Image (spheres, helix red, strand yellow):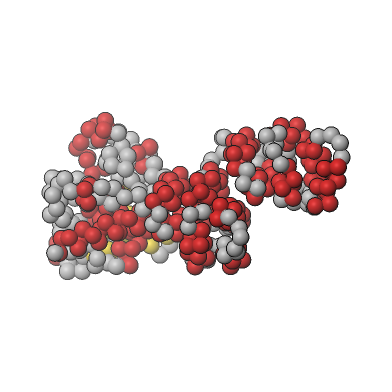
C-alpha cells in the first residue's frame, strides 16, 4: 500500500493530471537536475521515463516518496487522490494517517500564523531549530512555509517512538494558539486519535468492567454499599487513578470527617477497595439513558471530551489539589469531579440533579456550554469560580 513500490501502470495513471512534472521529479529521492534534462529531451512519455529513472536511482522507492514529493510541490489534490487509492481501508487509523488526512486544512490554517505557530512548536521541542529557521526565511510564501512545516511534522511523526503522544503534543500547541480554525482541526484530530467509545463498551444490564479492560481517560466508579465512588483512570505506574477523596480508597467515613479531602492519586486496587468496578458511559443514546434510569450515574447522553483532554484536566487538578473547592458530599463530590473531567460540565453528576454545584442560573450558557479541550475547560472553570466569588 502506501509503503509499497508503485507499478509503472499505476504510477503513470495516478500522475496523469500532473501539469508540470519537473518540480515534482526533483523532489523524488535519487532524481537530479541532470536526470530531468535527459528525460525532457527524450521523446515519449515523460512520466514513464521518470518512473524508470527514479527506480534505477532508488530501488526501494515507495508511494510514500511520491506523496512527499507532491506535497513539496503543493499538489494537494493529487496527494489526497493518491492517498485514498494507496491507503489500506481495513487498516486502523495510525497517528500518521490521521495527521495526513488533516494536512491540507492544517496547511491552510497555519499559513496565516506561520511564525507564531512554528515558534511555539519549537519551544516545546516538537520541531527542530532548522525547521523553525526555515519559517523565518524571507521571500517565500507563507503557504509554502506551512507546507514545509507540515511535511517536517509528518516525517518526525513517522520516526517517533511514541507517535500518538507526539501528535497529542502537537495538537495541544495548536490549540494554545487560540485560533478558532486551528483549535477545531486539532480537536478533530484528538477525537479520532483518542476517541471516547465508552458507550460501545457497556451493556444494557451491567456496566461492570475488569482492570484489564479499563482505558486511560475512562470515568470509572467503585460500587459501595451505600454510595458510588468515582474517579478518572490514568493508567500510569505512579498514578493509576485520580479522584476526589479524603484517603486513597474513597472511604465515606473519611469524606465526612477529613479536612484533607482533595484531588489525589491512588492505585486501581485501592480505588476499587474490593468492590465491583464499573465504567461510566458517555455519548449514550436517549434510549440507553432511559433503560438505565435506576443506574443513571452509569450512563450519560452528554458528549465526552477526547480521552487525552480528560487526562490533562484530571492531572491539572492533581497538581492543584485544593483548586476544585471544598468537598461536599451532596454538591461537590467525587462524581462531580469525574463528570467535569469528562464533559467540562458541572451539572451532570446524577447525585446533583436538579441542584447545582455552583449557584448559577440553570439556563446559563457558561454552565451548560461544553468544551472540547482541557484548556477551554480550565478557562471556563476559572471564569465561573471568579463569578461565584464576586
| Residue 2: x %, y % from top left | 65, 41
Position of residue 247 in the picture relative to residue 314 (left or right): left
Q: Quadrant of residue 333?
A: bottom left
Q: Is residue 181 left or right of residue 63?
A: left
Q: Residue at (58%, 55%) from the top-left corner?
A: 141
The image shows residue 152 at horizontal and vertical percentages of: 60, 56
Q: In the rendered view of the protein, which quadrant contains the N terminus?
A: top right
Q: Which residue is at a point 33% across and 46% down the rendered structure image?
A: 304
Observer able to see residue 3: no
Identify whether 203 is placed above or below 137. above
Q: Could you say which quadrant of the image residue 312 lies in?
A: bottom left
Residue 246 in the image, given as x and y percentages of width and height: 22, 64
**The C terminus: image quadrant:** bottom left
Left or right of residue 39, residue 92 in this image = left
Is 303 located above or below residue 384 in the figure? Answer: above
**Closer to the camera in the image, 372 or 324:** 372
Image x and y of residue 297, in percent? 23, 44
- Return the residue nearer the eye: 327 or 31: 31
User: Which residue does the image show at 51% across and 54% down from the upper left?
Assistant: 111
Q: Is residue 389 visible?
A: yes
Q: Nearer the viewer, residue 23 or 6?
A: 23
Amino acid at each position: 500500500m502506501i509503503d509499497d513500490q508503485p507499478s509503472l501502470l499505476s504510477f503513470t495513471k495516478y500522475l496523469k493530471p500532473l501539469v508540470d512534472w519537473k518540480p515534482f521529479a526533483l523532489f523524488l529521492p535519487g532524481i537530479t537536475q541532470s536526470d530531468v534534462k535527459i528525460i525532457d529531451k527524450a521523446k515519449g512519455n515523460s512520466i514513464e521515463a521518470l518512473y524508470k529513472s527514479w527506480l534505477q536511482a532508488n530501488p526501494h522507492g515507495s508511494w510514500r516518496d511520491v506523496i512527499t514529493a507532491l506535497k513539496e510541490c503543493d499538489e494537494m489534490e493529487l496527494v489526497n487522490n493518491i492517498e485514498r487509492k494507496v491507503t489500506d481501508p481495513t487498516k486502523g487509523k495510525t497517528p500518521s494517517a490521521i495527521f495526513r488526512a488533516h494536512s491540507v486544512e492544517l496547511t491552510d490554517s497555519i499559513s496565516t500564523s506561520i511564525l507564531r505557530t512554528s515558534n511555539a512548536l519549537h519551544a516545546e521541542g516538537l520541531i527542530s531549530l532548522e525547521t523553525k529557521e526555515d519559517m523565518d526565511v524571507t521571500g517565500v510564501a507563507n503557504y509554502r512555509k506551512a507546507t514545509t512545516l507540515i511535511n517536517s511534522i509528518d516525517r518526525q511523526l513517522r520516526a517517533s517512538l511514541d507517535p500518538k503522544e507526539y501528535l497529542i503534543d502537537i495538537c495541544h500547541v495548536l490549540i494554545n494558539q487560540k485560533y478558532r480554525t486551528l483549535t477545531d482541526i486539532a480537536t478533530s484530530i484528538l477525537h479520532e486519535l483518542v476517541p471516547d467509545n465508552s458507550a460501545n463498551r457497556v451493556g444494557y444490564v451491567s456496566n461492570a468492567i475488569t482492570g484489564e479492560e479499563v482505558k486511560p481517560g475512562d470515568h470509572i466508579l467503585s460500587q459501595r454499599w451505600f454510595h458510588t465512588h468515582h474517579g478518572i483512570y490514568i493508567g500510569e505506574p505512579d498514578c493509576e487513578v485520580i479522584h476526589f477523596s479524603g484517603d486513597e480508597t474513597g472511604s465515606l467515613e473519611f469524606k465526612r470527617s477529613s479536612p484533607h479531602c482533595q484531588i489525589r492519586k491512588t492505585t486501581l486496587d485501592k480505588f476499587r477497595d474490593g468492590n465491583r468496578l464499573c465504567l461510566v458511559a458517555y455519548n449514550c443514546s436517549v434510549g440507553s439513558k432511559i433503560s438505565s434510569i435506576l443506574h443513571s450515574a452509569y450512563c450519560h447522553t452528554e458528549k465526552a471530551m477526547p480521552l487525552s483532554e480528560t487526562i490533562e484536566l484530571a492531572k491539572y487538578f492533581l497538581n492543584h489539589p485544593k483548586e476544585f473547592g471544598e468537598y461536599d458530599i451532596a454538591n461537590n463530590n467525587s462524581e462531580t469531579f469525574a463528570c467535569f473531567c469528562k464533559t467540562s460540565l458541572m451539572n451532570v453528576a446524577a447525585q446533583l440533579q436538579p441542584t447545582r454545584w455552583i449557584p448559577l442560573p440553570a439556563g446559563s450558557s457558561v454552565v451548560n456550554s461544553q468544551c472540547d479541550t482541557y484548556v477551554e475547560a480550565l478557562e471556563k472553570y476559572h471564569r465561573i469560580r471568579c463569578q461565584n466569588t464576586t
